[in-house]
Structures are given as structure tokens and as C-alpha cells.
Amino acid sequence: MIAGQDDTENKPLHIAVIMDGNGRWAKKRGLPRTAGHQAGFRVARAIVEAVGKRGHDALTLFAFSSENWNRPNAEVSLLLDLFMRALQSEVDRLVKNNVHMSFIGERSAFPEKLREQMRIAEQKTERNDGLKLAIAVNYGGRWDIVNAARSIARRVQKGEITADQIDIGSFAEGLSLADRGEPDVLIRTGGEQRISNYLLWQLAYTEFFFSQVLWPDFDELELDRAIESFNNRQRRFGRTGEQVTGLDDA
Ligand code: IPE
Ligand code: IPE
Ligand code: MG
């Protein structure tokens, strides 16, 4: 931990996670990839609960990327199926645990029944003021930015603002997660060190933590490691280290 900072002051408010490694976890055990996704779902449930209990403000989980449609049809169908069943079985527990759940990503690609479950889950949890849980499904960071560009273009078209008035703040209003702070820490499990088109804009100043642990093996101990690592970082946002610690008179 850095001198002068205590861990409460440094607790990440918003944690983003790329839950990767389900397939490899299953393969190592001679199981079908789908068994990895099932195990991964159980871990996601446990982590949502742990993060809620620890009092973080927001958790954003990458469940299905816009590129994951490129997987074999059988795996994609199973993932959508699992997602549907998870929504049905988990919503009441989320309501009880005061979790506010929402989805980010392009929904139009999903079957109407699934979209309806998503709406139901959002409506049932909308009055909850505990953990803000966002699940990224059919999500891509580039899609998100294009979508924001479309919203601001519409505002210009309607004459609400001029093109010259577009700035970072007004543009960002059209992005996913605009109603919460940007992720403080990004955890990617499974050992890959890449973003895979996750929150490209929102991760501009996020601290990254790459874990070798495959997602179905992720647990609170590994979460602790990520948070401890975060607590040992100095976030400078372009300033000097001395400015941040207040040890210089500049
Ligand atoms: C992440 O695990 C879950 C999804 C992308 C849906 P993977 O299925 O990518 O697992 P690996 O990377 O093949 O091990
Ligand atoms: C990223 O994992 C997406 C999710 C975890 C949902 P991938 O396994 O799809 O990423 P790549 O293909 O290895 O970059
Ligand atoms: Mg993967």
C-alpha cells in the first residue's frame, strides 16, 4: 500500500471483469466447453454476491462479446440458453440482495423471449439501490462508441447542439454505463492480456489486473489479490507522482 493512503479510501468503486477461460477449464477436465460455461455461471453468481457484500458501487461483467457469435452454433445456443435460465432463476435473489441489474450491448440480435426476460430483470431490480450490476451481452466497445456517435448526431440533427459543441462530456452521455463512474479496476481471468473489444472508452484510466486463474476457478481470494494490487497502484491521471502524494509544492 502506498504511504498516506488507507484501503478504505482506495477501495475500487467500480470493478469490471472479463470472465475468460471457461473453455480451457473444461478441456483440462475432459469436459465439453459448455460444462465450463455452467461452472463459470456459478462463479459469476458467487462473485456478484461477494462484491455486493463488500460494498463496492458497481460491477460490470463481460458475458458475451459481439465477436462471440463467431463460435460454433451449438456453443452460442447453449450460452443463450444458459443466459435465459440464469435470468429466470436469479432475479428474485438479486431483488432480495438489493442489486440493481442492467444489460449493456446490442439487444436486437437476441430472440424476443430473451429480450423480454432482460426487461423483466431490469424492471424488477430498478428500485434497488445496492450494487449496480451490468452484464455485457452482445457487447463491443466499438459498437458502444458508434452508438454514442449516433445519439449525438441525432441531437445535432434536431438542432439541440451544434457539431462544434460536441465535447467529451456530451459525447460520453450516449455511452453505456454513463450513469456510473468509469471502472477503477479491470480484472481479466484466463491469462490473456488484451481487451477483446470490451469497454474501450470507459477503460481510459482503469487499472488492469490480469489473472492466470481460469474463470471457473476464480474466487474471493483471487478477488482479494486483484484489489490488493489495485491498492498498490498510484493513479496519476497525467500528473506527477509528487503531485499525487502532495509531497511537492508545485
Ligand atoms: C469466456 O470463456 C466465456 C465467453 C467468452 C462466453 P471462453 O469460452 O472464452 O474460454 P476459453 O478462453 O476458450 O478458455
Ligand atoms: C472475451 O473473451 C469475451 C468474454 C469473456 C465474454 P474471448 O474469449 O471471447 O476473447 P478472445 O477471443 O480470446 O480475445
Ligand atoms: Mg476466451
Image: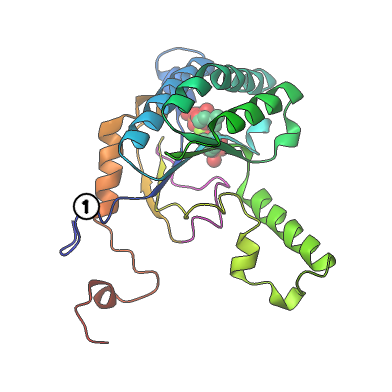
- Residue at image coords 42%, 56%: 206
Residue 244 versus residue 138 in the image, above or below: below
Residue 71 placed where, x, y %? 64, 28
Left or right, 112 with reference to 82: right
Task: Please state the horizontal and vertical placement of residue 214, each as a whole percent of the image.
Answer: 39, 30
Secondary structure category for the residue under label 1: loop
Picture residue at 79% right of the left edge, 68% below the top:
156
In the rendered structure, which segment of residues is drawn in magenta?
Answer: 191-204
Foreground: 96 or 76?
96
In which quadrant of the rendered image does the C terminus lie?
A: bottom left
Q: Where in the figure is residue 44, as x and y percent of width and height?
A: 43, 28
Give the residue at mark 1: 7
Question: The residue under label 1 is which amino acid type?
Answer: Asp
- Determine if the C-beta at disc 1 is less than 8 A from ligand 2: no
Which image quarter: residue 63?
top right
Front residue of 43/56: it is: 56
Residue 29: quadrant of the picture: top left
Residue 49 position within the rendered picture, expressed as x and y whole percent measured from the top left:
37, 29
Q: Is residue 170 above or below residue 181?
A: below
Q: Left or right of 214: which side holds 244? A: left
What residue is at 84 percent from the left and 65 percent from the top? 158
Q: Is residue 161 visible?
A: yes
Rendered position, 72 above or below 174: above
Quadrant for ligand 2? top right
Image quarter (top left, top right, bottom left or bottom right) of the N terminus: bottom left
Query: Foreground: 238 or 11?
Result: 11
Query: Residue at left 40%, top 45%?
Result: 57
Q: Is residue 17 magenta?
A: no
- Which quadrant of the view contains residue 140? top right
